[in-house]
Image: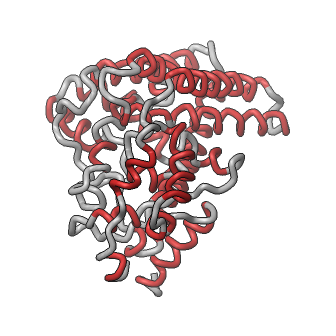
Amino acid sequence: MDSQQKNRSFPLSEAREIVRDLFAPNPVLYWLDFLFHATLGWTAFVLTLQAPAFSLWQLTFYIVTTLSLYRAVIFTHELAHLRKNTFRLFRVVWDITCGFPLMLPSFMYSGVHNDHHKRKVYGTSEDGEYLPFAVDQPHRIVLYLLLVFVLPLMIAARFILLAPLSWMHAGLRRLVWESASSLTIDFNYRRPAPSSTDSRNWRLQEFAAFLYGATAIGLATAGIIPWRALLLWYLVTALMFLLNSLRTLAAHCYRNPGDRVMEYTEQYLDSVNIPGNGLITPLWAPVGLRYHATHHLFPSLPYHALGKAHRRLAGNLSDSALYLQTSRKSLLDALRRLWHESRAHHPRG
């Protein structure tokens, strides 16, 4: 960012006034959206198993399964931002239908993600959701994407193997909490000891995820469910991780090496909006995440209000130049810019 942009402040007070009536979440919309996609996803999962192997029907059901469950899972982002002691039943149902069976219980994201939005943490080495891809070697981007093929196995091992072992060993217990209990992109991130920002029932969530995984393996071993159901679980979660990894790479510019706290305007311009196509873009950036820069302006805006907020801010700010600088034409446009910046910093990388 050039010096002129650095010295130009974002009109935050004006922006807040423009969207001040959009902060109330709509519980009915949350429930309908989530339940529809969770039900569709698990129904398509069963149909994928029943369809003829390698048929067009099986491929179709597999894609429907992945996209539907991906949208349902992304509601964990909303759970992290909803005020405490609200949407209690929704949180429980989300964990039972998505968090536990997919080995992604809500405590893995709560607290950790909220730190990502703290002004003194964002983009620094303490931010587990930030890596300096734009100033690092280009192969780091490739390696990050390749990780999606082992992540499902890693999370399964974390809950099915490491969790019960850690219950018997305090040192392992601490290690599992610090290094294997957070949905982050930085493997060097160490989660602080449980605090008030963490779910009070995270131990129960951990046990439930273990129970789901161990039961699935037990049922497959007993021949009650086919082993291909576990293979399908892996393939679905791997594709979900791939979609989310591409979305994550497009969500920020990742220009901060992590050694300093960025100015507020810098932090905003380091985030990205991709309004895109109303039908296609929400498939890879569901639940409002295509408006990621707008979300970083106002983290407590519910997902269903982000599109309206974006349109208002783009059209009604007295000076919308800085706001519009975060927009990209498409996922490919955002990824291409990130890749080119990385190559520019490391032409031989």
Pick the front one: 18 or 163: 18
Residue 227: x, y in percent? 62, 26
In the rendered image, is residue 144 in sight?
no
171, 332: nearer the viewer = 332
Instruction: Determine whether, in the image, residue 156 is placed left or right of residue 29.
Output: left
Q: Residue lying furthest bottom in this view?
A: 347
Tell me which corner region of the image, top left, top right, bottom left or bottom right, holds residue 56: top right
Q: Is residue 60 above or below residue 136?
A: above
Q: How is the image coloured?
A: secondary structure
Residue name at image x 31 percent, y 40 percent: 180
Residue at the image position 55 percent from the left and 15 percent from the top: 219
Does residue 149 appear to the left or right of 201 in the view shown? right
Percent from the top left, x then y, of residue 217?
A: 51, 22
Asked whether 282 or 200 is in front, the reply is 282
The reply, left or right, for residue 219 in relation to residue 124 is right
Check the image and report above or below for 138 versus 275: below
Where 330 sits versus 301, above or below? below
Q: Position of residue 257 (x, y in %)?
A: 29, 70
Image quarter of the N terminus:
bottom left
214 to the left or right of 200: right
**Residue 184 in picture, x, y percent from top left:** 36, 48
- The quarter of the picture where residue 134 lies is bottom left
Quadrant in which the C terminus appears? bottom left
- Asked if residue 202 shows in the view, the reply is yes
Vertical placement of 331 versus 242: above or below?
below
Identified at 46% across, 84% down, the residue is: 344
Nearer-the-camera pick, 222 or 82: 82
